[in-house]
Image (tube, rainbow, N blue to C red):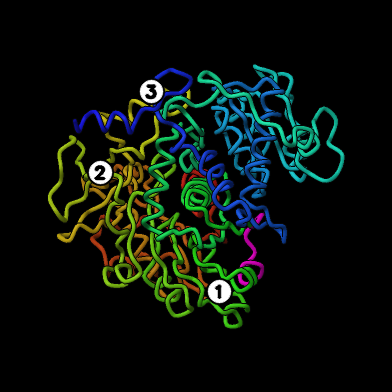
Amino acid sequence: MRRAVATAVYFIVRAGVLAPMIDSMNVAWWVHRWSQINPDKPAVIFQGRTTTYAELHARAESAACWLQEMGIEKGDRVAVLLENCPEFLELYLACARLGAIFVPFNFRLAAPEIDYLITNCRPRLLVFSQGLAATVRPLDLAAYQPPLVAAVVGREPPPPGALDYRGQVDGFAGRRPVLTASLAPADPNEPQVIMYTSGTTGQPKGAVLSYRKTFFNCLNANIFFKLRADDTMLVILPLFHSGGLFIQASPCLHQGGTIILHRRFKAERMFADIARHRVTKFLGVPTVYRRMLEAKQLGETDLSSLQVSAIGGEKVTIDLLRRCWAAGFPARQIMGQTETSILLWASEEDGIRKPGTVGRPVFYAEIRLLDQDGRPVPTGQVGEIVVRGPVLMKEYWRDPARTEAALRGGWLHTGDLARMDQDGYYYLVGRAKDMYISGGENVYPAEVEAVLRRHPAVRDAVVVGVADPKWGESGHAFIIRRDGQGVSAAELRQYCREHLAGYKVPSRVSFCQDFPRTPLDKVRKFLLVQQSG
């Protein structure tokens, strides 16, 4: 009897055919349902313009009709090169409606990098912002296979060879797409999005994310944020990344909340909207918080509406957490990656009570720490974080070798090294690929970086393992000094000797003005090494 009930819950009859229930796991269906339940509720507020749930659903339906008119079918890729804007969400929903695979590109990339992504995922359509036309212009869109149709989002006439997105979609106002079992998502495990990794170690990989994964990511985010329909979520992180799309926007739409969408991060605009719209939930990377703490509007803005100020994307120092608390941003930490979205989280109190922790596992994921031979490590020992559960990606797009290396025995090997304390809290040590062996001893750069950051003259530090003729490998430290502070390489190496074992002391120290970073504040270490020669 219990099995029969479970089967009845999971399957529905569609057009007389038994099919997996996909609607409840589809972001387009969530918006449709909210357009029926609460049609006049603001769904998105962007640059002073409010879009209700009824309007957002209608726009997504029109966009889906246009996609079908363009010949886009289930499984086809639709790429977008857009800054944060309502059209991004319209297309995201329209693709989910049709079963087309949505592929957001990083709008900060250069033309050769975009060329690599197009060649890799082979989209049928590229929709780009008018302000990014110079990036697209060098690309020979007709030379790709299949030939690539382009449409532009903007107020001015489109450039030669491109369609006017707004004009095209407006022509389908009031119409609904044609949907059948073969023309729409039919299984929760079908691909919904290809999201490219940040590329901290070289060429980005396309993580294939399913409808089921998005749904369970939203359930995890709902628990983390304590999301409700009366919440207002400020989104300043780029929607092309998991932080903006899957940790903020999608969960907010799932719960029927309101998204305050910013095209890009500007501290003064952010403070203004927190006060104007009484924002309740927010997520930022460490760089965002550092800029907010330095903004003149900080002491002039009422932050009392904020219930959750989340922080993630890069290692968070205890000093930054304490400064956030003092300023009215009690920061709740998250840790995850493109392939999984949120994996670990720490409450506001835990971040202060257990300095350095990234928290405990989210509800809908199972996490272990394994050694290099795949065996669980004892409490307090370092191991690689591996994950299984409904939040995992399906694969890397057109990359079976790296898929096989990452997904082994049903577990995703994240490449993140951590230890766990007796209370079940995790502490990141670094990346497995970052660890180097000096004189037969394992060195974890994150440990050395933490010591260097404690020096009063150091604002930030990155350590990379490099070849060493004597020890096999040794550390190369890259340092950003605090303004007005002078410190030499010899002084920093001596400081490390006072706090670390000798084999952990960097053999080289270089000074930088800044570090090359991904949009979510992760340092691209391979570029540092290349630039240093």
Residue under the point 64% across and 38% down: 60
What's the amino acid at mark 2? Glu
Is 348 in front, or is 525?
348
Determine which residue is flagged by label 3: 401
- Count residues near mark 1 (Cα–Cα under 10 Å), then give few for <14, some for 14-19, many for 20+: few
The residue indicated by pointer 1 is 483
**Amino acid type of the residue that numbered disc 3 sits on in the rendered structure:** Ala
Q: Nearer the viewer, mark 2 or mark 3?
A: 2
Q: Which is more toward the observer, 358 or 485?
A: 358
For marks 3 and 1, give the one nearer the viewer: 3
Q: SS of the residue at dot 2?
A: strand
Q: Position of residue 95 (x, y in %)?
A: 59, 32
How far apart are the alpha carbons under marks 1 and 2? 44 Å
Residue linked to disc 2? 366
Q: Name the residue: 36% across, 64% down.
A: 493
Task: Kindly tell me whether residue 232 is visible in this rendering.
Answer: yes
On the question of residue 532 being in view, the answer is no
Give, as a single range, the part of the protein colored magenta. Answer: 262-271
Residue 146, labelled with which disc? Answer: none
Q: Is residue 411 above or below residue 528?
A: above
